[in-house]
Amino acid sequence: MSYKVEFLEPAADDLLTLHAWIEGEAGPHVADVYLARLKEHCFKLAEFPRRGTPRDDLMSGARSLSFERRILIFYRVEDRTVQIMHVVSTFRETPILN
């Protein structure tokens, strides 16, 4: 049974910021390809949504999943939906989830 995956506004903002940074460092093609791989990784949560690490220390029901050891994806599972809450670089501080 497949879940729906949605990016909440803070996560969508995180992706735009990440894309802009990569584009500035390596060009638009590299940014596009990297973000496509990252989003594909997120959409795989539709098939196995509870595979991430529970992060109840940050927020009840929160989970995290890494991507290529550089990105942390914070999400929660609500009914049949995986809500991506934040997508952050591991070089930045972990956001306070609310």
Image: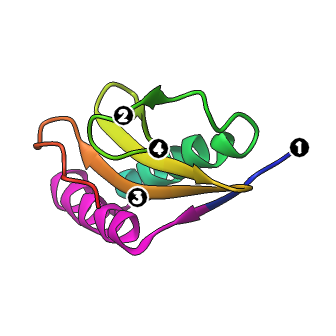
Query: Which residue is at 35% across, 62% downward?
Result: 15
Q: Secondary structure at mark 2?
A: loop
Q: Secondary structure at mark 4?
A: loop
Task: Calculate the distance from the C-alpha at mark 2 to the C-alpha at mark 4.
Answer: 7 Å
- What colour scheme governs how the chains and residues are painted in the rendered image of this protein? rainbow
Labels 1 and 4: the sequence-earlier one: 1
Q: Secondary structure at mark 1?
A: loop
Which mark identifies residue 1?
1
Q: Which residue is mark 2?
A: 55
Task: Calculate the distance from the C-alpha at mark 3 to the C-alpha at mark 2.
Answer: 13 Å
User: In the displayed image of the protein, which residue is found farthest to the front?
Assistant: 60
Q: Secondary structure at mark 3?
A: strand
The crowding category of the residue bearing disc 2, from other C-alpha atoms within 10 Å (few below 14, some 14 to 19, many at least 20), is some
- Image quarter where the C terminus lies is bottom left
Say which of marks 3 and 2 sits in front.
2
- Image quarter where the N terminus lies is top right
